[in-house]
Amino acid sequence: MSQNQPTIAPQPGIMEIALYEGGAAKVAGIENVVKLSSNENPFGPSDKAREAVIRAAHALHRYPNTDHASLRAAIGDVHGLDPDRIICGVGSDEIIHFLCQSYAGPDTEVLFTEHGFLMYRISAHAAGATPVEVPERDRVTDVEALIAAANEKTRLIFVANPNNPTGTMIGLPELERLALAVPQAILVIDAAYAEYVEDYDGGADLATRLPNVFMTRTFSKIYGLGGLRVGWGYGPREIIDVLNRIRGPFNLSAPALDAAEAAVRDRDHVHRCQTENARMRNWLAEALAEKGVPSDTSCANFILARFADEATARSCDEALKAEGLIVRMVAGYGLPNCLRITVGDEASCRRVAHVIGKFMAERAGVVA
Ligand SMILES: *Cc1c(COP(=O)(O)O)cnc(C)c1O
């Protein structure tokens, strides 16, 4: 480079971003792996969603619609929400991004919980804002700590409820208390796992009533459409209007829009997946506890298995991998002694329990 070449530099914050690593999908040398590392639905999407994608394949030369009216109407129908207060994005990741781009920036703060989803930090940095991690209480969101951490620079507070990777959640009255205590900021309730919780609206009612509550949802988890990338947000009209101004007009592809609409209308599929997840989640948690591996009561489609220390968690991860079972190390979330295990189908859960049981028995033998 010549001496007077000006420096090309990105905006502040960008170089602070650590690249997001998705859950592994392969183990070298093993063919039939079971991927339990990304909280995907083991049963996949509704057949109606698959059929919608195949139908959409005949019109791939056409641009998709820009207002997502049909998908928003379907979501509004199913959830009893005003479609005008819904925005759709390329996964809820994109909605999180829109929120940070629109409301945060240099000299502002974005709050999230200690073991919160990594995208909050990434999007805060991307907007040039300061990410602030707030302690939890025994792996549970601590509303008091969030209220104490908020100040006049706080613009956004992200709370995943249930949270990933802890699987724990707090009650709606607590979230309401938080929203009322920080009127200067938007409380974003990330309800990616809401469908796994019975009698829980994901914060929809709060987002209907309060001017500073916003809810995000996704088609990547119970709907089994992670590969298509569709998420949505719901909240005050003013916020929706702001986010729509920075949304790319063609952010969602036609197959994604059609599949999501078919998926959200298939309530039987959602119900079946929810029932089966609850059954196998409870079974797996109990099976692991019997083998000396505790976990907090999970409200989602995964279990956070706790081990004595990081070395044990790592060895157990290796033991699972050797059997073709891929789970998630969560050291990046400040939980180095834990493994996050997605609740798979019954056969996968039994294999996981068997391998972890054998691993723990062998260790006990070594220690004894
Ligand atoms: C999986 C997940 C999401 C969903 O992200 P998409 O971009 O919609 O796939 C959002 N928040 C949390 C906490 C998650 O675990």
Image (cartoon, rainbow, N blue to C red):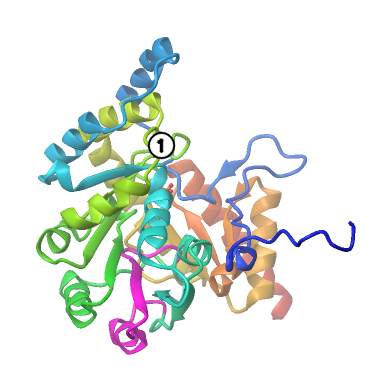
Q: Is residue 361 visible?
A: no
- Image mark count: 1
At 29% from the left and 85% from the top, the residue drawn is: 147
In the rendered view, tell whether residue 162 sits above or below residue 150: above
Q: Position of residue 40 (x, y in %)?
A: 45, 44
In the image: residue 347, left or right of residue 231: right
Amino acid at pointer 1: Asn
Q: Position of residue 75 (x, y in %)?
A: 20, 39
Tell me, yes or no, whether the highlighted magenta stretch contains residue 301: no
Q: Position of residue 134 (x, y in %)?
A: 42, 81
Q: Which residue is mark 1?
A: 251
Q: Nearer the viewer, residue 272 or 153?
A: 153
In the image: residue 24, left or right of residue 239: right
At 48% from the left and 49% from the top, the residue drawn is: 349
Q: Residues within 10 Å of mark 1 (few under 14, many from 20)?
A: some
Q: Position of residue 65 (x, y in %)?
A: 31, 26
In the image: residue 358, left or right of residue 175: right
Q: Quadrant of the N terminus?
A: bottom right
Choose top left, top right, bottom left or bottom right for residue 13.
Answer: bottom right
At numbered mark 1, what does the secondary structure look like: helix, strand or loop? loop
* Magenta range: 139-165
Q: Nearer the viewer, residue 156 or 33?
A: 156
Tell me, yes or no, whether the highlighted magenta stretch contains residue 147: yes
In the rendered view, tell whether residue 291 sits above or below residue 74: below
Question: Please, which residue is most extreme toward the top here?
Answer: 58
Question: Please, which residue is most extreme toward the bottom here?
Answer: 148
Q: Is residue 30 visible?
A: yes
